[in-house]
Amino acid sequence: PTVTSPNPTRWRGTELTVTVGGAWRAYKARIVAYLRQLAIITPYATLALDFKGSGGTKRDVALRFERRTTKVPPMPRTTGYHPSAVNELLLEQLLRKTTASTLVQFLSKSGALSSVSAALAKRVVAECGKGFRADDDPIDVADDRKKLQRLARLLREVSIFPPPTGDCLSPVGEYNLRLGVEKEVRPDYVATCASAPRVHDGHAFVVEAAVSVGGAGASDEAGLQVFRFANRIPLLFEGGADVATRVAFRKVKWPNYKIDIKREKVGVFVSLVSTRIPFKGTSKEYIGEDATEIHDAVKDCLCRCGLQLKAQLLKRDQAKQGRDRKKNLLRYVPDVASALWKVLGSLDDAGP
């Protein structure tokens, strides 16, 4: 490598600098919140913000979020579309772009589709019925509208294909998520959980969640706060309609886990990683509650976090009860000692 400047600390990595202009007064809170949440979900990166005000140095703002770990999430592997995620338009595009010479090769070996073996490809062609052959040219299938519709419908409807794996995903990991929450929130208690790879509309996804209780870096007021991430990008807007918010407020019974959201500062962090995030609306700021598989995965992760916290909070409550009993008993020690002194004194005066 060509060294252009001294590097006494032998630092290695990638540094990216972006210059942005805008209305700082109007969006300051949002920018700081975004960077802070980004620091939570990427604890392996150092983030810095330098704002230069137009009215002199008094308005300058400098923020820096140091990284906590050097463990970076694994690189995702390239994968094809799962058959259940292919629609007619996408299938036509794949058929026209492929270099495979036959339909069976396109289905099983071209890399355009995943979870399709040669045996399954031959079975699919056979089930397509009259007019389909294993050696059909993919271009000819794309040009025939009826064949294209039949093949697309069969790929989406049959359930003979194995589900997609999580190799194509790059979740942050429970370890990094815990470090990020501990670094920025500094909670009294924290629990993390990650789901196994699941499938929604033919696309693999993983849900990672963390629940924190207390903390010097948490909100000043007691209550439940939900932080949402999609492919490690913080989502700041339209949170009330998001599946994570709905589940956290309506589906999880926090008192069952000894968590009082009215008296304690509780943080819920939900990260969704998928090859296709099912956003609602054009803003792409929230995920609908109608995504049943994602809804169930979020609820399962939060409940498992609650079970972890329950054991810790029970110990906390038992220790507090012990301290309270000791404190109450100590209040009566002077009175009991004085009474005993008087009794013993009266016995001495009475003599043998």
Image (spheres, rainbow, N blue to C red):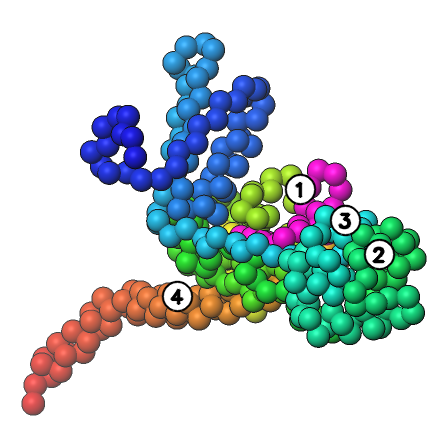
| In front of the other: 86 or 210 | 86
Q: Earlier in the sequence, mark 2 or mark 3?
A: 3
For the residue carrying disc 2, how many other residues have a C-alpha within 10 Å: few (<14), some (14-19), or many (20+)?
some
* Label pair 4/1, CB-CB below 8 angstroms: no
Over which residues does the magenta segment extend?
A: 268-288
The residue that mark 2 highlights is 141
Task: Find residue 316 and name its label.
Answer: 4
The residue that mark 3 highlights is 96
Type of amino acid under label 2: Val
The residue at 74%/38% (across/down) is: 282
The residue that mark 1 highlights is 285
The residue at 39%/15% (across/down) is: 58
Q: Quadrant of residue 325?
A: bottom left
Q: In the current view of this chain or complex, which residue is farthest to the left? A: 352
Q: Earlier in the sequence, mark 3 or mark 1?
A: 3
The residue at 28%/26% (across/down) is: 4
The residue at 36%/43% (across/down) is: 67
Q: Earlier in the sequence, mark 4 or mark 1?
A: 1
Q: Is residue 286 magenta?
A: yes
